[in-house]
Amino acid sequence: MSINFKIIGLRIRELRLEKQMTQADLAEKIDMSATYMCHIETAKRKASLESLLRISNALEITMDRLLNGNQTSDSGEYLADLLMLLDDCTSQEKRMIFEIAWATKKCLLDNRYCHHENVR
């Protein structure tokens, strides 16, 4: 299994924007160039473990959160992100998000079944 640097780059971008930081802000905080930071976010360059640790510290998150989505056996994958997404929602908004997620999952399962039928 290889590391999905695209997922990591997207997560860095999402978290950076949450903190209302520019790439230049984050790059300065971790003593890297803004260009290199851009390359990490777009997965044009593979960040080293040390770079990822510096980024996670600068964003005040755990490495687990940064690497979320890269482990195949992680049953709690994206759980922290989903909980954070729901954190400031009303009960009605939470219900709507649940119904959308449920319908999306049903559609994915239906299409997976149809895809398997067409392959046979």
Image: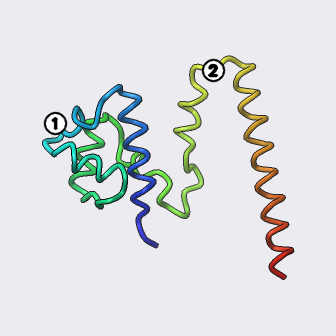
Q: CA–CA distance between discs 1 and 2? A: 34 Å
Residue at the spot 39% in from the left edge and 41% down from the top edge:
13
- Which secondary structure lies at badge 2? loop
Within 10 angstroms of label 1, few (less than 14), some, or many (20 or more) residues? some
Relative to 84, residue 6 above or below: below
Residue at the spot 67% in from the left edge and 17% down from the top edge:
90
Three-letter amino acid code at the position of disc 2: Cys
- Which secondary structure lies at badge 1? helix
63 and 106: which one is in front?
106
Residue at the spot 75% in from the left edge and 37% down from the top edge:
100
Q: Is residue 87 left or right of residue 54?
A: right
Q: Is residue 9 left or right of residue 37?
A: right
**Residue pointed to by mark 2:** 89
Task: In the displayed orientation, state which residue is furthest to the left.
Answer: 31
Within 10 angstroms of label 2, few (less than 14), some, or many (20 or more) residues? few
**Residue pointed to by mark 1:** 28
Three-letter amino acid code at the position of disc 1: Glu
Residue at the spot 39% in from the left edge and 31% down from the top edge:
17
Contact between marks 1 and 2 (CB within 8 A): the answer is: no
Relative to 120, residue 46 above or below: above
Residue 45 % position (x, y):
29, 60
Residue 16 % position (x, y):
35, 35
Q: Is residue 119 left or right of residue 23?
A: right
In front: label 1 or label 2: 1
Q: Quadrant of the C terminus?
A: bottom right
